[in-house]
Amino acid sequence: MPNDDDLAVELLGRTDHGQVAASLRAMPFLALARHVVVDGRVLLRLHRGCGYHPACLGSVVAYGTDNLDSAGPGESVWSVQIVGRCEAVEPTAAHQELFGPAPRFVDGEPYDPVYLGIEPQFSTVHSMDNALERQFRRTL
């Protein structure tokens, strides 16, 4: 079985959205984000209008996702979390294409994207059975 860091990044690449966790004025929050994995780094696209991105910038954040709603028969149910320092990024045209089209509105406001990057420092992966190991070995 690969280490958790390799598996975490591979699993993140199987999903499109997750939640970034950080704190704002000592209060924890979760914010929905679109993500892509590029060279082992996780790039996030958030709505600027929610105001969460300044709390993430320069801070250590957690980012997680799962397949709780999408696991098919015989597939393991899993969740993954990475932790690392969050920085502002300027996405290339190729990165923007990976993100796909942006939503038109968030909470009734026109969508205004902001891009962040996380270099995973450590990760955790949890699954309900050993089917995840079998699935991952088949993808190698």
Image (cartoon, rainbow, N blue to C red):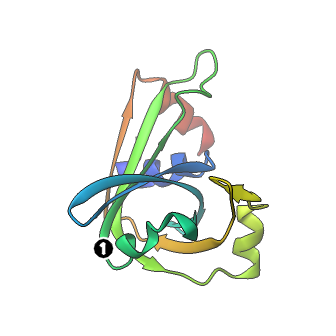
Amino acid at dot 1: Ser
Residue at point 48%, 30% (across, down): 132
x, y percentage for residue 57?
39, 77
Q: Residues within 10 Å of mark 1 (few under 14, many from 20)?
A: some
Residue at point 59%, 52% (across, down): 13
Residue at point 40%, 22% (across, down): 128
Among the 4 quarters of the image, the one containing residue 110: bottom right
Judge from the rendering whether residue 94 lies leftward or rightward of residue 35; answer left or right.
right
Judge from the rendering whether residue 102 lies leftward or rightward of residue 121; answer left or right.
right
Residue 12 visible = yes
Most foreground residue, 131 or 63: 63
Among the 4 quarters of the image, the one containing residue 82: bottom left
x, y percentage for residue 42?
51, 65
Tag 1, which secondary structure?
loop
Residue 3 visible = no
Judge from the rendering whether residue 126 lies leftward or rightward of residue 40; answer left or right.
left
Residue at point 32%, 60% (across, down): 22
Most foreground residue, 40 or 84: 84
Vertical relation: 122 (above or below) 11: below
Extreme-top residue of the structure:
73
Extreme-left residue of the structure:
26
Residue that badge 1 annotates: 59
Judge from the rendering whether residue 87 lies leftward or rightward of residue 15; answer left or right.
left
Q: Which corner quadrant holds the N terminus?
A: top left
x, y percentage for residue 123?
33, 53
Figure disc tally: 1
x, y percentage for residue 138?
60, 36
